[in-house]
Amino acid sequence: MELSISEIMESIPHRYPFLLVDKMIDVVPGETATGVKNVTINEPFFPGHFPQKPVMPGVLILEAMAQTAGVLAVQFLGDDAKGKVMYFMGIDGAKFRRPVVPGDILHMRVTKTRGGGAVWKFDAEAYVGDELVSQAKLTAMLGAE
C-alpha cells in the first residue's frame, strides 16, 4: 500500500517547511512503512547548515523518521486518531553514519515494536539507496484533541 502527500497531510499537521515526508510506500497498516523524502538544494535549512557543503541536519532526519511513524500510527487508528496529534516522547540509540546531501532520496523505514493505543514505539532506520545513514528507537504518544 502507498500513501500520497495528500493522505500524509490528512494524517499529520506538519506543513512546509517542516513536512519532511513526500510519500509513503510499502505500508503494512499498523506495522511497518517506508517514508520517502526527496532531498533538494531548495530545502530551507541548507542556506544556514554548512552552506559551502550542504548537509541535512541529523535532527531533521530523526524528525522525518518520526513523521513517518506518526502517519503509520494515525492511519492505523483511523477515526480514533481524528483531530489528535502524535507527540514525540523519546529517542534512544540515535546514530548517524553518513551525511545526507542534496540529490539524495531518503527512505525512512519504521517498524512498530509496541502500539495500538496511545503510546507507540518504533525501530527506525534511514537509508540512501542500500546504505544505512541513520537509526534510532522512537517513542510517541497520541495526544488529546
Image: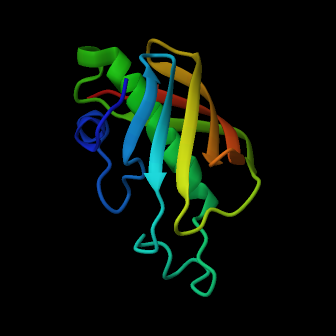
Q: Residue furthest top?
A: 116
Q: Which quarter of the figure has residue 76? A: top left
Q: How are the colours assigned in the image? A: rainbow
Q: Is residue 36 above or below residue 44?
A: above
> Which quarter of the figure has residue 60?
bottom right
Q: Residue at x 58, y 15 (%)?
A: 114
Is 65 positioned to the left or the right of 9 in the image? Answer: right
Residue 142 showing in the rendered view = no
Q: Is residue 18 above or below residue 23?
A: below
Which residue is situated farthest in the front direction here?
129
Return the x and y of residue 21 as percentages of the image width and height. Answer: 41, 47
Quarter of the picture holding the C terminus:
top left
Q: Nearer the viewer, residue 88 or 15?
A: 15
- For the N terminus, the image quarter is top left
List x then y, in percent, for residue 91. 65, 40
Please state the horizontal and vertical placement of residue 38, each as a whole percent of the image: 45, 56
Residue 35 visible in rendering: yes
Q: Is residue 2 above or below residue 126?
A: above
Residue at position x 54%, y 51% from top? 106
State the count of labels: 0
Res. 93 image quadrant:
top right
Identified at 57% across, 77% down, the residue is 49
Query: Quick one: which residue is furthest to the bottom in this view?
Result: 52
The x and y percentages for residue 119 are: 51, 20
Q: Is residue 112 left or right of residue 71?
A: right
- Nearer-the-camera pick, 137 or 130: 130
